[in-house]
Image (spheres, helix red, strand yellow):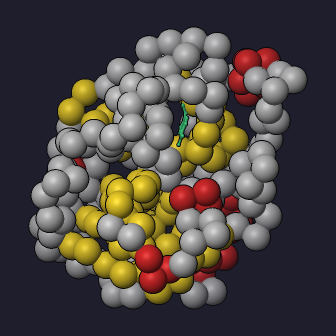
Amino acid sequence: IIGGQETSISQVPYLVYMRQGGSFICGGSLLTPSFVLSAAHCVYGAREQDYTVHAGASRLAQKAPVIRNVARFHIAPTYSPSNFDMDVAMLQLELPVPLTAGQVATITPCQSAAAANSYVRISGWGVEYESSRKPAAQLRTAVIRVLPYAECQQAYAGQAQITDSMICAAVRGIKDSCSGDSGGPLVYRGEVCGIVSWGFGCGRAAYPGVYTNVASTRVKRFIDQTLRKL
Ligand code: 4AZ
């Protein structure tokens, strides 16, 4: 998180992080005791057995109170690694997370889309500066603003495609998500309306952060189908 402040997992109890081969890789959100919402690019091309999901911890150095293996990745079948269209995945856990134990909780997927210009919150252990290589030791958070779709298309015009499965948000030049925040939630009125996905650099005035649009028809259908038929 660029331009944010420290927070505690008790403020975002549905937030988890993933390790791949023991190394911190991404964030995610518990939608149910057995399903974590994250970004497709966090798990694409990887193997379930190399991943663990960590819940209830504020600091990466602390041993999380709940650690789970991953039974199955569910990656959106239309995910495009070339332009990050449909950058959404669900991680099905081997064992459910006990939600009554400690601070762990779940969050609802976005019902009503985050309106343009509304304020939303992002949280994660991602780097604090674009050039940094190491994640934040302590969980961080920032409040940013959703951009009108046209403004985001203008920002990336001729350089990248902003599809209907994407929304942009930032306090341009000041507050943004960055490497390691991927997969984590953008929260609007207590619901997860975005998933940290991509951007050109981090915290740059010209390039807002891009998030998977959880309220879009295609993303919603994928989440609903994954939760229902399994
Ligand atoms: C990344 O590299 C990344 N500013 C995540 C989010 C953003 C940029 C890069 C958005 O994972």
Query: Residue 226 sits in which quadrant?
Result: bottom right
Question: Measured from the top left, where is residue 133 in percent x and y?
Answer: 39, 37
Q: Is residue 164 above or below residue 129?
A: below
In this view, the residue in front, 213 or 55, is 55
Q: Is residue 77 above or below residue 82?
A: below
Question: Measured from the top left, where is residue 39 in percent x and y?
Answer: 57, 56
Question: Measured from the top left, where is residue 9 in percent x and y?
Answer: 21, 50
Q: Is residue 125 above or below residue 37?
A: above
Question: Residue at position x 55%, y 16% from top?
Answer: 204
Q: How many marks?
A: 0
Residue 57 is at least partly visible in this image = yes
Question: Residue at position x 31%, y 78% from top?
Answer: 68
Query: Residue 132 sits in which quadrant?
Result: top left
Question: Residue at position x 50%, y 12% from top?
Answer: 173
Residue 123 is at least partly visible in this image = no
Where is the C terminus found, in terms of image quarters?
Answer: bottom right
Where is the N terminus found, in terms of image quarters?
Answer: top left
Question: Residue at position x 66%, y 76% from top?
Answer: 225
Residue ranking furthest to the right: 158
Query: Residue 115 sits in which quadrant?
Result: top right
Q: Is residue 63 above or below residue 230?
A: above
Question: Measured from the top left, where is residue 109 in percent x and y?
Answer: 52, 57
For ligand 1, give the image quadrant: top right
